[in-house]
Image: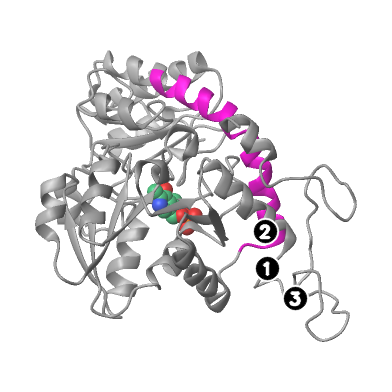
Amino acid sequence: MNFSTKAIHSGQDPDSATGAIITPIYQTSTYFQNGVNIHKGYEYSRTGNPTRTVLENSLAAIENGKYGLSFASGMAAEHTLLSILKPGDHIVAAEDMYGGTFRLFEEVFKPLGLRFSYVVGDLESFESAITPNTKMFWIETPTNPLLRVYNISKLATLAKRHNILITVDNTFATPFFQQPLNLGADIVVHSTTKYIAGHSDVVGGAIIVNDDETYLRLKFLQNAIGSIPGPFDSWLTLRGIKTLALRMLQHQHNALAIAKFLTTHSAVEHVYYPGLESSPYYSLAREQMKGGGGMVSFTLKQADVNIVNNFFKGLKVIALAESLGGVESLVSYPSLMTHGSIPPEKRLKIGITENLIRLSPGIEDADDLIADLDQGLASSQNKDKISNCK
Ligand SMILES: *Cc1c(COP(=O)(O)O)cnc(C)c1O
């Protein structure tokens, strides 16, 4: 089956108990046992819940993986995943990553004895960072917020040669545009909060793998640690998956239109979008993705907090907020918002400067979004004008 069909049907047979077409919300913590340990496969909802099972099967199907596991948040998924490692184990990670992932590495797992090296995302830098203790490569692609694209299959081949697992955070691309397991990755993680659930109404995370042993260890840890999503959150995420294909097409349509518009605007210095032919990542993105994705970042020629705030206040449709991937357009200021947990020197080294703006176009009309950006940029330039607050 192809993606859109899988997203609606795979793992989502009519409910076996009632025939309900839509998976019911099994809002229960426990299950009747007809004699000790005699039950229908469920005994306690931390271990398993039927609504969650359907979500996990659906996640596995859309990533073209064997096993899916869902979590209370993207960070909960990452926490559980890192728990397969032991003190002394070493991870090589591409340096431009989600701020919360960096914080989890440095402030939670480093004190527990894991070791981390951060490299720019090319093959040589990954290879030269490998030590005898290296157990995992960790990349996001496209990256947040600079939308750099890393070569998954080349890094996976290198990892395999050294018996290292490679994890890809596929939150930005989504399985609609990119399926890392098909490209040789071992583990895919997601913040399903973003495009997968897609409506800015639920926080969640996921891990998808093919290897039986890795799955069993993760399944054990999911239950042992317990950072699982509840039945209603699982249901919301499942509902989001059904429209993922349609939404991603419109997100991409809007992102490309906006990227092209911004490139021509006199107040804009640089536009980051891997779907632009002028992007250094264009050909690699075409190779490993089915499109440029939904996110656009750009820098203003001039920026201080006032200019940036005037821009944000000038916007009437696009809202200033953390997060991304919802049906409504959101804009954020990485240096002080999503990446505020990264030390300033490191932030600047990666390229997260004061004039950088990250945009998550929703699925509204592209012309309306462009008009909104145009007026926002005009008010950012107008130093005397006091913008009305939203
Ligand atoms: C948001 C995000 C996360 C963290 O997920 P939460 O659901 O917020 O816990 C991890 N990685 C990326 C790329 C993200 O955008």
Quadrant containing the N terminus is top right
Element carrying mark 1 = loop
Whether ligand 1 has any atom under 8 Å from the Cβ at mark 3 is answered as no
Residue type at mark 3 is: Glu
Residue type at mark 2 is: Arg
Where is mark 3, residue-wise? 43
Q: Residue at x 32, y 19 (%)?
A: 262
- Spatial CA distance of label 3 from label 2 is 14 Å
Magenta residues, start to end: 229-256
The relative height of residue 284 versus residue 43 in the rendered view (above or below) is: above
Q: Marks 2 and 1: CB-CB under 8 Å?
A: yes
Where is mark 2, residue-wise? 52
Q: Position of residue 257 (x, y in %)?
A: 41, 16
Instruction: Give the farthest residue toward the bottom.
Output: 36
- Mark 3 crowdedness (10 Å alpha carbons): few <14, some 14-19, many ≥20: some
Element carrying mark 3 = loop
